[in-house]
Image (cartoon, grey):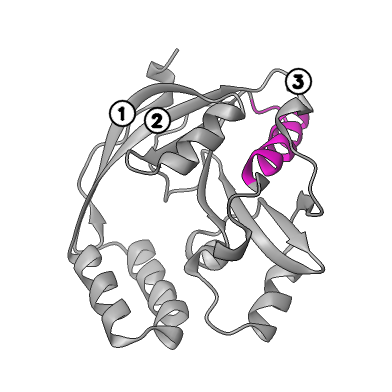
């Protein structure tokens, strides 16, 4: 086990176990021992011409997040989902939030080539969106397509040409949201871990036209 992996596991345990009951811990532990998930791979070309017609008007504010958003949330809210801690797990900096009255309703993280904990092996000019979460009370309001519009605009300004996402094959709601936002299904991949160590090969985006 590499030093980076040991550090990540310690960070995950530190943030998750504080608010995890026994049943939740057993589910997490079983997934840690063996995980075998099947994903659809989706791609969106970022060409600067993305339409905002897919973004429904809501009372939710969507913007690029800053670390103080997470610090405020973690200091005032108990039991935050693990998706709020990806900056601690993986060292990622770019994320987008949707909030209402100062409360985060949704978070999406952007991973680039230099980040190691990705499902895909990214080519130059590619990015991967992952660890996406809409809180239960805000689901069904069309928030994620609106967040994706802001993500497209940000990535286009920063030279990213293609955005990829891997969605569990049984996650119908996320699949519908992605297709509504212009993503196209381009393949399948598997994500297999044994004792926290990935053993499946990454799909290289350079092989995806």
- Check whether the beta carbons of the residues at disc 2 and disc 1 lie within 8 A of each other: yes
Residue for badge 1: 188
Q: Secondary structure at mark 2?
A: strand
Task: Identify which residue is drawn at 55% across, 40% down.
Answer: 112
> Which quarter of the figure is the C terminus placed in?
top left
Q: Which residue is mark 3?
A: 48
**Residue 115: x, y in percent?**
50, 47
Spatial CA span between label 2 and label 1: 5 Å
Give the residue displayed 36% in from the left and 32% down from the top.
40
Q: Nearer the viewer, residue 16 or 147?
A: 147
Using residue 76 as the reference point, say whether residue 204 is left or right of it: left
> What's the distance in space between the residues labelled 2 and 3, CA to CA?
22 Å
* Residue 147 shown in magenta: yes
Magenta-highlighted residues: 144-160
Numbered tag placed on residue 41 in the rendering: 2
What secondary structure is the magenta-colored segment mainly? helix
Q: Residue furthest front?
A: 140
The answer to whether mark 3 and mark 1 are in CB contact below 8 A is no
Q: For the point 55% across and 63% down, which residue is it? A: 136
């Amino acid at each position: 086990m590499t030093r980076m992996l040991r550090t990540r596991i310690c960070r995950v345990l530190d943030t998750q176990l504080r608010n995890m009951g026994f049943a939740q811990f057993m589910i997490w532990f079983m997934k840690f021992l063996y995980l075998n998930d099947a994903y659809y791979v989706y791609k969106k070309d970022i060409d600067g011409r993305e339409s905002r017609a897919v973004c429904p008007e809501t009372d939710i504010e969507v913007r690029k997040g800053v670390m103080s958003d997470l610090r405020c949330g973690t200091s005032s809210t108990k039991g935050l989902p693990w998706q709020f801690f990806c900056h601690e797990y993986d060292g990622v900096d770019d994320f987008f939030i949707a909030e209402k009255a100062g409360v985060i309703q949704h978070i999406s993280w952007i991973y680039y080539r230099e980040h190691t904990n990705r499902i895909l092996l990214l080519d130059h000019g590619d990015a991967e969106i992952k660890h996406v979460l809409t809180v239960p009370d805000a689901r069904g309001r069309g928030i994620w397509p609106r967040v994706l519009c802001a993500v497209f605009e940000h990535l286009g300004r920063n030279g990213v040409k293609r955005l990829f996402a891997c969605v569990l094959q049984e996650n119908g709601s996320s699949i519908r949201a992605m297709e509504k936002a212009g993503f196209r299904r381009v393949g399948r991949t598997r994500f297999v871990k044994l004792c926290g160590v990935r053993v499946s090969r990454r799909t290289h985006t350079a092989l995806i036209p």
